[in-house]
Image: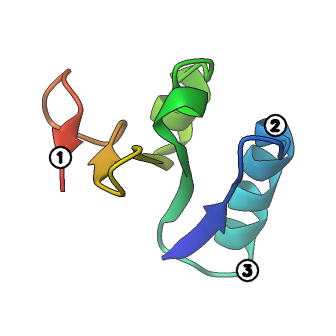
Amino acid sequence: MGLELKTPRDDVTRGIGQLTEALAYGYDRAALVTTLHKTKDIDRVVFDKFGFLLFAIDSKAEVHQVTGNTSAESSRL
């Protein structure tokens, strides 16, 4: 799996391009990891359409899977 890590100051749109590049280079899956606060501003349509995963890290350093779930709610990992 290709992982793209983004800080709150990074460009998430560029990250989506990098996820696409990871798939082009042969990775089976691609995921973007960013802060929980930042995920609230992300339109998840692209993630759902291309099967990208989106993970959020909260202030307690807990990781939450935001997209790619079987349920509509985000799940805590």
- Residue corresponding to mark 1: 76
Q: How far apart are marks 1 and 2 (CA)?
A: 24 Å
Residue 13: mark in rendering: 2
Q: How far apart are marks 2 and 3 (CA)?
A: 19 Å
The amino acid at mark 3 is: Tyr
Q: Which of 75 and 22 is in front in this view?
A: 75
Label 3's element? loop
Q: In which quarter of the image is residue 59?
A: top left
Placement of 57 over or under 31, stated as above or below: above
Neighbourhood count class around disc 3 (C-alpha, 10 Å): few under 14, some 14–19, many 20 upward: few
Ranked by sequence position, the earlier of labels 1 and 3 is 3
Placement of 20 over or under 40, stated as above or below: below
Looking at the image, which residue is at 70% across and 71% down?
22
Q: Which of 58 and 53 is in front in this view?
A: 58
Ranked by sequence position, the earlier of labels 1 and 2 is 2
Q: Which residue lies furthest to the bottom in this view?
A: 26
- Residue corresponding to mark 3: 25
Looking at the image, which residue is at 46% across and 36% down?
36
Looking at the image, which residue is at 86% across and 46% down?
14
Q: Is residue 64 left or right of residue 36?
A: left
Label 2's element? helix
Q: Which mark's residue is nearer the viewer, 2 or 3?
A: 2
